[in-house]
Image: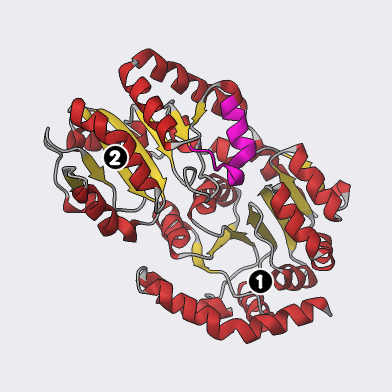
């Protein structure tokens, strides 16, 4: 009954949902594309060996790629769904036509049932914690094996699910396996009603991410574009963070012309706004999309393209990972860490707290509690190659110590598909 009421509310909210899609499409036109897919009209799949992988947005999509490649190698066909255009862009960029990519259906009974009839997957693999009552209910009813992998559940999210415990318990009963990143997070699932036998602690598959095959080539190209500079890369930044970063870095840029700041907003449609901010502060700025090389006078290189941040992390001397100076909750620090780079982040780390704690404990991530602390840390690291090397080595060591989740996760998927 509760799920029926939930579905009714969803149907009533569709005009607002579509208005939100339209509103977002004004900045990101891809939101308007393939709108039918959001109502379950996915491509009709041929064959009976399909695995449905759901990765809500860009971060989850990137994390899912090594897992998807292993599934393809094992002979499975894979459909990947995303909620956002950036998630789809990452899948299409990294996997091309090896997989079928589309939007996940809205969580309405007819849309979900239509999607399942057209795709007929054997298994549904959900990356991180993206739970929808109708998706889980109808997939389970159709006999689809459901696995929630790389799962995480913060205390705040657990409290939220606890307030709708009837729905939460029903969803957990539909899931065959939950593979969590830590025991603490697993305990929260059990407290919500998950049967302990269905819980497995595997760690995070994001530690197992591999480097792209063209890393050396593309990194060399960016080295030529940027020149021989001391490079600070600030990735996945949000509104408000760019101002704090520029305030912290501007004195360094003015006193030490060998320093270059690479600024990569989380959403590249904000590039024009960020460029205006840089220019207002009197900083010489070059945008990646212009395909111009930096001159010795360039102070900020603005990355306004998709899928290239990793190459810039690889040639950085210092990195900052955004969503952490403002209360977004922090983005994944593993990409710069995997290149052995020192990582700075702000105080807001709710979304990645368990992972951040491991890096902090090992000395591979420095948490700055304020813009003033950020400025102090940047100045200190710019002056000391020894500090940079020490922090970078600790970050790389943390990555190595936490690998292995991918193999454990694949075994759990194989076990379910073999039943």
Judge by depth and name the residue closer to the eye, 80 or 193: 193
Count of picture labels: 2
316 lies above or below 287: above
Within-10-Å neighbours for mark 2: few <14, some 14–19, many 20+: many
Task: Confirm whether the magenta stretch covers residue 201.
Answer: no
User: Does the rendering let one see residue 312?
Assistant: no
Q: Dot 1: what SS?
A: loop
Res 30 visible: yes
Query: How is colour applied across the structure in the image?
Result: secondary structure
Instruction: Point out which mark residue 120 bears.
Output: 1
Horizontally, residue 357 falls left or right of residue 303, namely: right
- Outermost residue toward the top in this view: 386
Residue 180 is situated, as x and y percent measured from the top left of the image, at 72, 44
> Would you name the residue on which mark 2 appears?
262
Q: Give coordinates of residue 138: x percent, y percent.
A: 74, 73
Q: Nearer the viewer, mark 2 or mark 1?
A: 2
Residue appearing at x 33%, y 59% in the figure: 270
State left or right for residue 167 relative to residue 403: right
Q: Earlier in the sequence, mark 2 or mark 1?
A: 1
Q: Is residue 134 above or below residue 5?
A: above
Q: Is residue 342 above or below residue 235?
A: above
Q: Residues within 10 Å of mark 1 (few under 14, many from 20)?
A: many
**Is the C terminus in the top left, top right, bottom left or bottom right quadrant?**
bottom right
Residue name at image x 16 percent, y 43 percent: 284
The stretch of residues the image draws in magenta is 346-360
In this rendering, position of residue 337 left or right of residue 278 = right
Q: Position of residue 89 (x, y in %)?
A: 41, 60
The residue at 59%/50% (across/down) is 71
Residue in the image at 58% along x and 22% along y: 362
């Amino acid at each position: 009954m509760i799920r029926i009421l939930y579905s009714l509310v969803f149907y009533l909210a569709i005009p607002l949902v579509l208005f939100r899609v339209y509103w977002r499409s004004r900045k990101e036109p891809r939101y308007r594309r393939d709108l039918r897919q959001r109502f379950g009209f996915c491509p009709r799949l041929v064959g009976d060996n399909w695995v449905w992988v759901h990765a809500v947005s860009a971060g989850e999509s990137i994390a899912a790629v090594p897992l998807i490649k292993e599934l393809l190698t094992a002979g499975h066909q894979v459909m990947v769904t995303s909620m956002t255009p950036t998630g789809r862009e990452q899948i299409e960029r990294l996997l091309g036509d090896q997989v079928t990519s589309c939007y996940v259906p809205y969580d309405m009974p007819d849309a979900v049932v239509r999607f399942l009839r057209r795709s007929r997957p054997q298994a549904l693999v959900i990356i991180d914690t993206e739970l929808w009552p109708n998706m889980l209910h109808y997939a389970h009813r159709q006999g689809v094996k459901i696995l929630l992998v790389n799962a995480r559940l913060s205390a705040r999210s657990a409290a939220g699910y606890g307030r709708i415990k009837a729905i939460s318990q029903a969803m957990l009963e539909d899931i065959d396996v939950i593979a969590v990143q830590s025991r603490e997070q697993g305990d929260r699932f059990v407290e919500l009603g998950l049967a302990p036998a269905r819980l497995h602690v595997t760690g995070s598959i994001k530690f197992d991410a591999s480097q792209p095959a063209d890393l050396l080539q593309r990194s060399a190209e960016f080295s030529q574009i940027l020149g021989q500079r001391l490079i600070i890369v600030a990735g996945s930044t949000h509104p408000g963070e760019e101002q704090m970063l520029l305030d912290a870095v501007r004195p360094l840029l003015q006193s030490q012309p060998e320093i270059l700041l690479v600024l990569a907003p989380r959403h590249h449609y904000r590039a024009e706004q960020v460029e205006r901010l840089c220019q207002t502060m009197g900083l010489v700025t070059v945008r990646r999309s212009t395909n111009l090389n930096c001159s010795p006078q360039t102070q900020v290189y603005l990355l306004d393209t998709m899928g290239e941040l990793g190459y810039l992390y690889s040639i950085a001397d210092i990195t900052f990972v955004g969503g952490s100076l403002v209360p977004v909750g922090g983005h994944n620090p593993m990409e710069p860490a995997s290149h052995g780079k020192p990582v700075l982040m702000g105080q807001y780390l709710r979304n990645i707290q368990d992972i951040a704690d491991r890096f902090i404990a090992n000395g591979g991530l420095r948490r700055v509690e304020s813009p003033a602390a950020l400025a102090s840390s940047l100045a200190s690291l710019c002056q000391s190659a020894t500090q940079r090397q020490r922090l970078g080595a600790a970050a790389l060591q943390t990555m190595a110590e936490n690998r292995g989740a991918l193999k454990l996760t694949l075994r759990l998927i194989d076990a379910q598909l073999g039943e």
